[in-house]
Structure formats: C-alpha cells, structure tokens
Image (cartoon, helix red, strand yellow):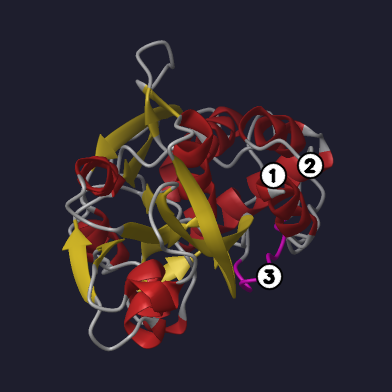
Amino acid sequence: MRRAILGAAAAGLLLLSACGDDDEPTTTSNGEDTPAADGEGAPASEDLELVSDGTLTVCSDVPYPPFEIEDSDAPSGYSGFDIDIVQAIADGLGLELVVQDVGFDALQSGTVLAAGQCDLGASAMTITEERKENLDFSDPYYDSLQSLLVPVDSDIDSLDDLAGQALGVQQGTTGKAYAEENAPEDTEITDFPSDGELWPALQAGTIAGILQDFPVNDEHATADEGYHIVETYETDEQYGFAFPKDEKPALLAAVNEQLQELRDNGTYDEIYNTYFSTDS
C-alpha cells in the first residue's frame, strides 16, 4: 500500500516545459532564457557562472535515504534519487558533479547558497512561498507526502495519540511545520539536525515517533519490520532544486531544460524506478 501511494504521487508530477531547438534560446516555466547551445546542446560552462569552472557543485544534507545516500561506488561519492538526477543533469551539461554535505536548515534558509558555497541545493526540499523569498527553484521534480512512523508495538495509531509524548522532526522542514500545526498541544516536538539523528532516536526510544517525508519513513519501515507508518498526510508538496536568489538565471534555465530532457528520453523514469516501486 505504501508503494502504491508513491506511484500515485509520481503520476501527479507537473510536466516540465518543452525544450527548444539547439541553436536558439528556450524559455522555462520560470520565465528564464536558456543560453544558446554549445557543442552537444549544453550551454558553455563559463555562461553558467559556476562556483568552480567545469564543475556542478551541489549542496545536500546526507543521509536522507532514498534521496541522499553515501555511496563510495558512485562518481561523486553519493547516490540516491536526488543525487542521481543531478548527476544526470551534470552529465547532460558536460560537467563534473561534486557534492558537499551541509546542514538542511542552512540550506533551506539560503545561507550556504548565498555564501557561494555551491551552485545549487538538492536535498528533497519542498518548494514553499517562504523559501522563495531567499531562493530560486527549479521546476518541480517530485511530489511528496508527510507521514508518521512509530514502533509496531506502540499504542500510537495517529498523530492525536502523541499527546504528552515526544515527536521527532527535522529542523527547518515542512514536516516540522505540519507537526507544529496539527499535533496535540502537549506533544513534545523535538528537533533533530537530520534523519541521521532522528532514526537512531526512535530506535533508542528517545522519541515516540517521527513525522517526516513519506519516502524516508517508508525506507525505515521496509528495512525494519519493528516499525510502521500509521498515517500519511496529503500536503501537496513538490520538491525543487534550490538556487541562490536572482544569482544564477542561466544555470537555473539549463537545469530546467535538462530535467525536461530526462523526462523526454526516459532517464527520469529509470532513476525513479530504481528507488521507488509502484507495486502494491
């Protein structure tokens, strides 16, 4: 059933803007013009105003499976749905991919991007109006749900059952915002830097449940039968790649064009099926 929900979510993804001729600029859904193509259809590296010429430097909060995973066998040292997508984008642009592990709160606030630490953020980040004040976003590339993960042997069947108990969330996330708006008033909402601390806390019994993105909780429930998802929450969230505000229009346009190309040539579906089964 959990996997079926993922399939339905994927089916609802927005279609990205169509690509233009290789010799002419194209316009994305964000209204940005893509530079005229160079060589194999990718814009010249110097036109993209990269942190390091010839390299796409991506900031991400790792681990956050199945979106971000440490992987010594991968070219960048990382894999996961997000990372594989940006690896394909880098390949399409003729760039080397370098991934920097950063805290999610500093990433979603725009701090590390504004400081010029990386070209874009790829970290299962929901596009929100609040975040748009400090960031630019690519076209959406994934639809998500929020969810509640608890031990199978607990008496928790819903968010309401967490009254008077500790609920774990990741700081700076839409999951935290949902918990603050919907959990009982006496729920102890506890922040953690990332899933790398949330999951061990639940296993240790420090918290009674985790409220966060469905695919991440589903990964834990699949790996350990001692835990299960008791509720999912339709929040109409879509992930986007984040860029420093008003600083990289050419790169933003190029990334959107590559996202559309991945859709058109089937690469997006191949990557999606690697991490998310649509079987019930």
Task: Tell me the residue at 58%/50% (across/down).
Answer: 254
According to the picture, the residue beneath numbered tag 3 turns out to be 29
Instruction: Decide which of 146, 244 is in the foreground and name it.
Output: 146
Q: Crowding at label 2, few (<14), some or many (≥20) Cα neighbours within 10 Å?
A: few
Instruction: Decide which of 131, 233 is in the foreground and name it.
Output: 233
Task: Tell me the residue at 26%/40% (across/down).
Answer: 203
Q: Is residue 230 left or right of residue 151?
A: right
* Mark before the other along the chain sequence, 2 or 1: 1
The CA span between labels 2 and 1 is 6 Å
Task: Tell me the residue at 43%/54% (across/down).
Answer: 149
State the extent of the magenta-drawn residues as a range.
25-32
Look at the magenta stretch and give its main secondary structure.
loop
* Amino acid residing under circle 1: Arg
Q: Nearer the viewer, mark 1 or mark 3?
A: 1
Q: Is residue 133 left or right of residue 84?
A: left
Q: Which mark is residue 280?
A: 2
Query: SS class of the residue under badge 3?
Result: loop
Task: Tell me the residue at 62%/64% (across/down).
Answer: 33
The CA span between labels 2 and 3 is 34 Å
According to the picture, the residue beneath numbered tag 1 turns out to be 3
* Mark before the other along the chain sequence, 2 or 3: 3
* Amino acid residing under circle 3: Ser
Whether residue 99 appears in magenta in the rendering, the answer is no
